[in-house]
């Protein structure tokens, strides 16, 4: 069976159901449980020219498909908001046209945290992708995740008759809730 035969009319719901093993949480009014899943796909599309991000800036994204406690707003294009404490898997991709270095940066209670070596990724030549993945622990509600530029990044552009495509994306999913003291 092909995937489009089992997806039905709303393939985003199907994809999130597949991506997220649904967990049940109290709905807050005593009337039972509701499904909960924190996952998001945040992306940037190529334009007609290369896009440069200088050292010390963050990659700007344009759109998102979100569920649960992952947030993104085009008015703050560098920030991915994570509402619920827990353990998250983050995977990202950048189609770079320059030798570049980036890192995952968390902003906790409006304070940017240092980029750690285990969350730092690079390519070694121009016209190479940067892929990264990490497990990050979120300890405070409404923590912000950024792809922080440590060495200049130039993202690819749409070439002549090619269709427009994604040149940067982030996939994030919560794998475990935060440990609660008993």
Image (spheres, rainbow, N blue to C red):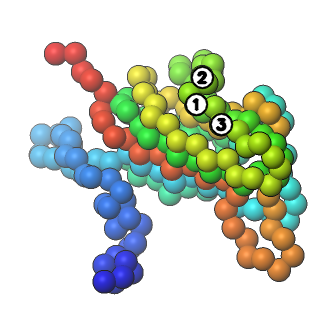
The residue at which mark 3 appears reads as 121
Depth check, front residue: 23 or 18:
18
Q: Dot 3, how many residues are within 10 Å of its Cα: few (below 14), some (14-19), or many (20+)? A: some
Query: Measuring 37% from the left and 77% from the top, which residue is drawn there?
Result: 3
Q: Dot 1, how many residues are within 10 Å of its Cα: few (below 14), some (14-19), or many (20+)? A: some
Q: Reply above or below: 156 against 56.
A: below
Q: Quadrant of the C terminus?
A: top left
Query: Measuring 80% from the left and 33% from the top, which residue is drawn there?
Result: 151
Residue 153 can be seen in this image: no
Residue 128 place in picture, x, y as percent: 75, 53
- In contact (CB < 8 Å): disc 1 and disc 2: yes
Label placed on residue 119:
1
Query: Measuring 70% from the left and 52% from the top, which residue is drawn there?
Result: 129
- In contact (CB < 8 Å): disc 3 and disc 1: yes
Residue 8 place in picture, x, y as percent: 33, 79
Q: Reply above or below: 98 against 87.
A: below
Alpha carbon distance from label 1 to label 2:
5 Å
Label placed on residue 116:
2
Q: Reply above or below: 154 against 166.
A: above
């Amino acid at each position: 069976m092909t995937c489009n035969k089992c997806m039905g009319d709303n393939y985003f719901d199907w994809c999130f159901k597949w991506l997220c093993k649904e967990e049940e949480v109290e709905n807050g009014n005593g009337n039972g449980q509701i499904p909960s899943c924190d996952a998001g796909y945040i992306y940037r599309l190529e334009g007609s020219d290369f896009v440069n991000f200088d050292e010390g800036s963050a990659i700007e994204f344009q759109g998102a498909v979100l569920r649960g406690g992952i947030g993104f707003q085009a008015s703050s294009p560098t920030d991915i908001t994570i509402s619920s404490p827990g353990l998250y898997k983050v995977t990202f991709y950048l189609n770079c046209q320059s030798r570049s270095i980036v890192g995952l940066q968390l902003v906790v209670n409006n304070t940017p945290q240092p980029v750690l070596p285990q969350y730092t990724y690079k390519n070694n030549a121009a016209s190479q992708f940067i892929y990264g993945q990490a497990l990050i622990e979120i300890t405070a509600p409404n923590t912000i995740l950024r792809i922080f530029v440590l060495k200049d990044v130039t993202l690819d552009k749409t070439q002549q008759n090619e269709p427009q495509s994604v040149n940067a994306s982030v996939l994030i999913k919560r794998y475990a809730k935060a440990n609660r003291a008993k």
